[in-house]
Amino acid sequence: MNLAYPGHILQVRAPAINFYVLRDQEELYLIDAGFIGGLRLMQRALVRRNWNQFPIRGIIVTHGHLDHILNVKTIARRYGAWIAAPRLDAEQYAGRSNYPGQARVAQWLETFGRPLLGFQRFTPDRLLDDGDMLDVWQGLQAVHLPGHTAGHLGLYSPERRLLFSGDLFVSYRGAARLPPDIFNSDPPQIPTSVAAALRLQLDGVLPNHCDPSPPAEHLRRLRLLGAKLASSPSRD
Ligand SMILES: [Zn+2]
């Protein structure tokens, strides 16, 4: 199977953050919904791929950070799509964040960013917990990978051996790194979540903050990061 962006995945690229459109038969599903300009970038990418004829049925959220959920409500309303999102980040969908420690910086950024960027609150149609299955791609499984936020989760396709890994790690210039701690609610949990992700049967991972390398390359980088974290479990 050629994993260099397989035909049923569209990566919508933006300078700060990417998100994904999945095709399932004649229907589309989003993994996250992007940040500033995300809607326009998605529409352009759909036209280029000739997917603009297909309806967007659902939006699946990996976690409650503003750069992943800014456009959720707008897109859901415009396309009549359902929203599924991690239960433990529900405060953020309601426009509130309460992050501890260094992540208070992220909290300030979101508090100022929401009104500035016109964030619209939303109530998910479905709240996701670890192990929940979504009826997309013959089963897309929610895998709780906390640390970045309390509810942060990956979406795993056992059929395609792919993990949409949200912000578990970032992947640029040949290497996987952990997100900066000002964005992580509980950094000590992250190595455990990386190890949990790497126990899945995988041929590729698809992060939200990454260069355009294929999923297999991001997996190779994540494995190196996982080995590094395992050999120094207390990072300080
Ligand atoms: Zn994030």
Image (cartoon, rainbow, N blue to C red):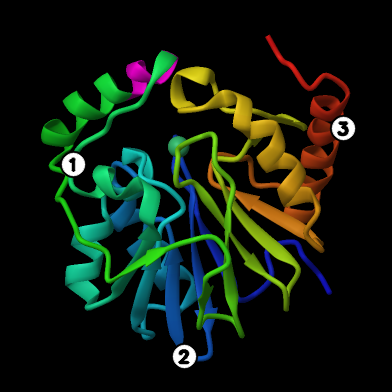
Extent of the magenta region? 102-106
Tell me if I can see residue 218 in this picture: no
Q: Kindly identify which numbered label has been placed on residue 95.
A: 1
Q: Crowding at label 2, few (<14), some or many (≥20) Cα neighbours within 10 Å?
A: few
> Is residue 232 positioned above or below 168 on the image?
above
Q: Kindly identify which numbered label has been placed on residue 227.
A: 3
Going by the picture, which residue comes out furthest to the bottom?
A: 25
Query: What type is the residue that disc 2 sits on?
Result: Glu
Confirm whether the magenta stretch covers residue 104: yes
* Image quarter of the C terminus: top right
Q: Earlier in the sequence, mark 1 or mark 2?
A: 2
Residue 223 figure quarter? top right
> Is residue 215 positioned above or below 235 on the image?
below
Name the chief secondary structure element in magenta.
helix
| Residue 70 locus on image (x, y percent) | 27, 47
Query: What type is the residue that disc 3 sits on?
Result: Ala
> Which dot, 1 or 2, sits closer to the camera?
1
In terms of depth relative to the viewer, which is nearer, 236 or 136? 236
Tell me if I can see residue 53 in this picture: yes
- The residue identified by callout 2 is 26
For label 2, the SS is loop
In terms of depth relative to the viewer, which is nearer, 124 or 180? 124
Query: What type is the residue that disc 1 sits on?
Result: Gly
